[in-house]
Amino acid sequence: MNIKSNRQAPMVLGALTAVATLAVAIPAVYSQSVVKVDGSSTVFPLTEAAAEGFTKATGGKARVTVGVSGTGGGFKKFCRGETDISNASRPILQKEIDECRKAGIKYIELPVAYDGLTVVINKQNTWAKNLTVAELKKMWEPTAQGKITNWNQIRSGFPNLPIRLFAPGTASGTFDYFTEAVNGKSKSSRGDFTASEDDNVLVNGVLRDKGAISYFGYAYYEENKNKLQAVAINGVQPSEATIKSGKYTPLSRPIFIYVNAKSASNPAVQQFVQYYLKNGAAINKKVKYVALPGNVYNSVLARFNQKKTGSVFGGKEKIGVKVNELLATPKD
């Protein structure tokens, strides 16, 4: 982890000390228990960091495996009962709710961080540093396929240079959210782009081509900001402050873990989720994600401890979610 200034160092070290302090309090009640997690590539670094801390805290007696198959792919496994926890960069959708219901699986919906989908371009791109949502739509909507292929078609004055499009795969919650926010309908997108569930593939694609553009979670941009540049959307740059305040709209969103309610009775799963939420702010800081307010983690932890199942979103994607909405009573 890079500590950016002496002023920040005590805060970061203090947060990590809090994580280490909790480790002492976790009872060793496991016998090589395995907690199975899969899903979103965006949520992966956060859950992986929580898993590493928890494994150390239990002296290796509990192990957490974290896979990456995209939000949609993760929910498929989750609703088949193959995983204990599903990482998700969007709320569970109605079709997934129905699949879980058919399999008799109830779930506990837990927001764990904020994210801001970050549109990125090549460092040599000097013309597209600020785009409007309307221009993003013009670039990405289904009718653009095979027609909008050059930058000069996006705005007068842009160069006559081919647009190279890179984006998360269609099983990704990031893809779902971006298409809903920009094109008005989830999964509504042109199809002639290079798709990958691996955000590093998207980074490298933009890195190699002056005319390339992509989007992914804010933390992946932070990791690669020396290689790429972020695009301001409607004049607002993505940052921890603009994401948390809601100014970076419509591409700011909460991200989640979903816990199988039956698995929540497993001591290893229970203690892992409690560890994750009690240390939410410190873990977010460690991986450079945007933490929820501290009181929100307390409320989310109470939801988990009380095993309140269901979702607050009614099976639909929602743009511009506020903190108080995350804390509404979930419905099965």
Image (spheres, rainbow, N blue to C red):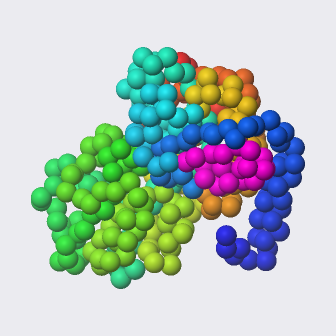
Rendered position, 282 above or below 94 = below
Residue farthest along the front direction in this orientation: 31
In the rendered image, is residue 68 in sight?
Answer: yes
Of residues 11 and 82, the one nearer the viewer is 82
Q: Is residue 230 left or right of residue 287?
A: left
The span picked out in magenta is 46-66
> Residue 181: image x %, image y %?
38, 46
Rendered position, 235 above or below 298 = below
Question: What residue sits 53% from the left and 35% below the top?
Answer: 83
Rendered position, 219 above or below 104 = below
Residue farthest along the left direction in this orientation: 147
Question: What residue sits 27% from the left and 74% below the top?
Answer: 211
In the rendered image, is residue 319 in sight?
Answer: no
Rendered position, 55 above or below 271 = below
Quadrant of the drawing holding the N terminus:
bottom right
Verify whether residue 48 appears in magenta: yes
Verify whether residue 276 appears in magenta: no
Question: What residue sits 67% from the left and 38% below the top?
Answer: 33
